[in-house]
Amino acid sequence: MTIPVTTGSLGLLLSDPGGPDHHKPRGWAADLDTNLQAIDTAVSGLSGGGGALQVARVEVTSAQLLALVETPVVLVAAPGAGKVLVPISVAWQYKFGTAPYDAPGSATVDYSSLAGDISGPGIGSGCLDQSSNQFNFLAISLNGPNPQSTAENLALVLANEAGSGDFSQGDGTLTVTIAYYVVTLS
């Protein structure tokens, strides 16, 4: 199956999130550049400014996927005192190896405090347990408001939900591409 993929003017790998409209981010426009400009305008209006939209790409090995409960994978390093990483979206590309994972849980993006403050569909069942390459693009939001300490100067990580158990048996890899801003707090 071919998945249509679009590259926006900022060089991000983008595609329509698909599915019914109620699964799409509020205010989703058909023009992806319009969506990024709206996000840029909203974030730059925050106290201290939002800086430039940045993108990080992390290759997650099979060994890292198998140990996500104990050892989350850093996607973006902590930005420094008085700053917060504001994730906007994440794209997952699962590259099937020779065996699918037993995926009892769901890997999600979170702050390194693992307070569960960031929401967005995780990756696990329906992706890592498949015998073919998979791709998805997701909007990220904050479950908030939250204490500033749950996000200030903390890294963004890929972690497996607490209590769900590690993935097992698989040997594929995962490429995670995350778009984010660094916001300076006042």
Image: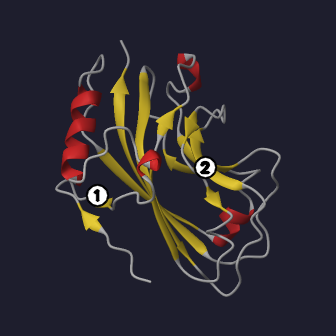
Q: How far across and down, in percent of the image, does residue 132 sit?
A: 58, 82
Q: How far across and down, in percent of the image, does residue 32 sit?
A: 24, 53
- Quarter of the picture containing the C terminus is top left
- Numbered disc 1: secondary structure: loop
User: Dot 2 corresponds to which residue?
Assistant: 108
Q: How far across and down, in percent of the image, does residue 83 sit?
A: 41, 25
Q: Looking at the image, is 98 positioned above or below residue 41? A: below
Find out whether the residues at labels 2 and 1 contact each other: C-beta distance under 8 Å.
Answer: no
Q: Looking at the image, is 95 positioned above or below residue 16? A: below
- In the shown orientation, is residue 128 left or right of residue 42? right
Q: Looking at the image, is 100 positioned above or below residue 52? A: below
Q: Looking at the image, is 65 positioned above or below residue 145? A: below
- Numbered disc 2: secondary structure: strand
* Label 2 environment density (alpha carbons within 10 Å; few <14, some 14–19, many ≥20): many
CA distance separating discs 2 and 1: 20 Å
> Closer to the camera, 131 or 186?
131
> What's the mark number on residue 2?
none
Q: Inspect the image, locate mark 1, and give the three-letter code of the amino acid beneath it.
A: Leu
Q: At x 77% / y 44%, what residue is drawn?
A: 162
> Closer to the camera, 80 or 55?
55
User: Which numbered disc flags the more N-terminal residue, 2 or 1?
Assistant: 1
Image quarter for residue 91?
bottom left
How is this picture coloured?
Answer: secondary structure
User: Dot 1 corresponds to which residue?
Assistant: 12
> Closer to the camera, 141 or 173?
141
Q: At x 67% / y 63%, what residue is drawn?
A: 64
